[in-house]
Amino acid sequence: MEENTRTAQVMREIRQRIARRQLSTGARLPSIRAFAAAMKVSKSTIVEAYDRLAAEGIVYSRRGSGFYVAAPMPPLSLADIGPRLDREVDPLWVARQALDSEAAMLKPGCGWLPAAWMPQDSMRRALRLAAKGEPAALADYGSSLGLAPLRQLLARRLHENAISAAPEQILLTDSGTQALDLVCRYLLEPGDTVLVDDPCYFNFHALLRAHHARVVGVPYTSQGPDLLRFEQAVVEHRPRLYLTNSALHNPTGAVLAPLVAHRVLKVAEQYGLTVVEDDIFADFESEPSPRLAAFDGLNRVVHVASFSKTLSASVRCGYIAARPDWVNAMADLKIATSFGGSRLSAELIYQMLKEGGYRRHIDSLRLRLAHAMGPVADRLSALGIEPWIQPRGGMFLWCRLPAGVDAASLSRQALQRKIVLAPGNVFSLSGSAGSFLRFNVAQCADPMLFQELKSLLDEAQAAPAVAPQPNARPAQAAAVSG
């Protein structure tokens, strides 16, 4: 029985390598001797596994040469790229639960504000103005760089954060995610190495795997990336990109300290590293923290943002600010992959941004989030769920669970009670955040949430002890994913 189980493991590993594009049609399988050593099984187990795969038509043998992939590659499945996690707690599953869940579900693990917090009156006015405007706004493609008045307005807004970007250095996209995708399409080749924070926004992992990047995690502290580990990773792995949030980091809520920002850019300059700065939470800060793009002048830094968090996640509009030659090249890629972009979305965002009410709306959001942050932190602390830091703004609390409680297991139990949580290891490449959860304070208004959390914690702590999960603080672990 044990031998059959080992054979199945070998077969599963080969299938996954084919699914990940690590073995393409016609590629030679690892030699029997080498693969037996790598899998820590006998050579007869490898032979049996290869023979069974050949019987299924997945591989074929050449006498005296070895085994080769016969089957065409299946459609790309992001779930099969990188280390296989329990599907119930991997990043894409968490995202789909939050997006597809019924309205009655509690979603403290999601990454957006409640619809009632958004400027609905402003949206309706913008829609009416668009309906009365030029027919082209409703029917035509957008221009290659995007709506000129919006790019001019964005250039002025960036200047307020000391980022100097002409309108011609700004490319509108259909979302922040599309902006990051275009940056990766332009700057990465399959197999290139990318640094990310550990922990970081979980969709960074999925996006980079889709681009077949080699992902290296750098421990994140309350001041920014651990500088010693950051420089060690740059020297050892020679990454092409470093992808990060500099303001109100997701999921920790930390902000980048000026000295750390300065050192990151010095290392980037020394080793030819490009920094991609995702600034999607910029408007939630009452006092702007350092921006890498401001220090760098958009030389080695690409600045990305969108309006899904502050205006509307339904009206898809983001942008890239970068050096002119890169913007022009990415505009070509945008045309190749999505043609002209959404002119209507850009028109709507422009109308809402140029209203005097936008600043009042942002001030109201900041105040509302600040009023929610303290009470939610207190109620979580009363349950033994302790915030890692007290953020100075934004919507997220990065919290450690009581000793012995595993976030992934708790999240699976919570789903049965119609609660979507965000367990720590979906954000951690190293799997070192097994005792953490990310909470969105704007989605924690229902008192029932805390009653259910208490019940779940009581059950988890009363259950028999299980094998411990990786449980290091974010600043204590790093990992590599290929």
Image (spheres, rainbow, N blue to C red):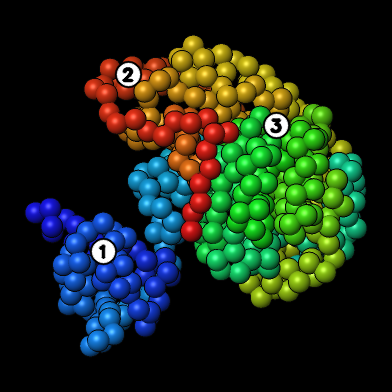
Q: Mark 2 sits on what residue?
A: 461
Residue at image location 62% in from the left, 42% down from the top: 229
x%, y% of residue 410? 37, 30
Residue at image location 17% in from the left, 64% down from the top: 45
Check disc 2 and report its element: helix, strand or loop: helix
**Foreground residue among 245 and 346:** 245
User: For the residues carrying marks 1 and 3, which lies nearer the camera in this image?
Assistant: 1
On residue 36, which mark appears? Answer: 1
Image height check: is 84 above or below 43?
A: above
| Alpha carbon separation for disc pair 1 and 3 | 45 Å
Image height check: is 4 above or below 73?
A: above
| Alpha carbon separation for disc pair 1 and 2 | 41 Å
Q: For the view shown, which residue lies furthest in the left direction?
A: 1
Indicate left or right for 180 with 455 as reference.
Answer: right
Q: Mark 3 sits on what residue?
A: 223
x%, y% of residue 160? 89, 41
